[in-house]
Amino acid sequence: MGLVIEKTARILQLVSEREPCSLKDLTAATGMNKSTLFLILKSLVEVGFLAKGDDSSYSLGQALFRLTGKRRYAERLRLFAQDIAEQLRHDVDEAANVNTIDGISYTRIAASDTLQAVKVDNDLLNQTRFYRSATGRVLLAHALPELRERIIAAIGLPIQEDWPGISDHEQLIAALDRIRSDGIADRVIANGQVIYLAVPVARPAGEAPVAIGVCMPAFRFKDQHRVLVLKSLHAAARRLALMLAET
């Protein structure tokens, strides 16, 4: 198996350097048996890693570009998200984070903690359960229906501790639809002592949802600070969406 992988990697490297390449060229460059090489090339074309032209030459395929594109997007998202989280924390002086869905998993990609003396415990900040955090709820609300159902099937319905009042699938979907319509989710935890707010980042259809959240002691979320937090949270989401759209 290892030899096959090495040969495949060598073929892809050669095609990337010399495309378009003929079977004759690749046979000479790799030193491989022509029949063996042809079968590997055929498999690579079938999965989309290579494309075969009308003249039977080979070039890199769209599936390979999609894979590398996803990696570049993930790198940009992580870089931009950290900048946004730090700027949001600076603007409101509260803990901020950015999250997404990777496969069917809730994934934190950036975070910046407040410097205030009174702040939310790290165990509450680092929750990575969809139902328990405001960002998790926003991610589910903005996931494509098929993805959302896969996640729900994997994790089940929320327990009452995580989402009081939700006891069946219909209630859950209705609650997620309200979050999508409202454009914001809030979660009061720790016996009312902590408030967690989250909003979605606008993304093109089909891309994994992204959510930005702010978490703080409930006693600070009032008056002018409340207005500042809500305004800054929505502004941060717009900035991140714009940064991702421009790259």
Image: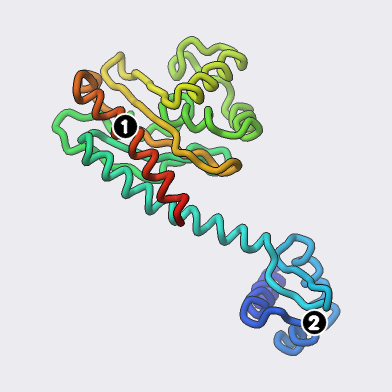
Q: Which residue is mark 1?
A: 214
Q: Which residue is mark 2?
A: 23
Which sits earlier in the primary sequence, circle 2 or circle 1? 2
Q: How many marks?
A: 2
Label 2 secondary element: helix
Residue 227 or 94: which is nearer the viewer? 227
The image position of residue 75, as x and y in percent, is 45, 56
Horizontally, residue 49 falls left or right of residue 198, namely: right
Q: Residue furthest right?
A: 35
Label 1 secondary element: strand
Figure quadrant of the N terminus? bottom right
Picture layout, residue 35 above or below residue 108: below
Give the residue at x 43% y 44%: 241
> Residue type at mark 1?
Val
The image position of residue 106, as x and y in percent, is 49, 37
Give the residue at x 34% y 39%: 236
Picture layout, residue 185 above or below residue 56: above
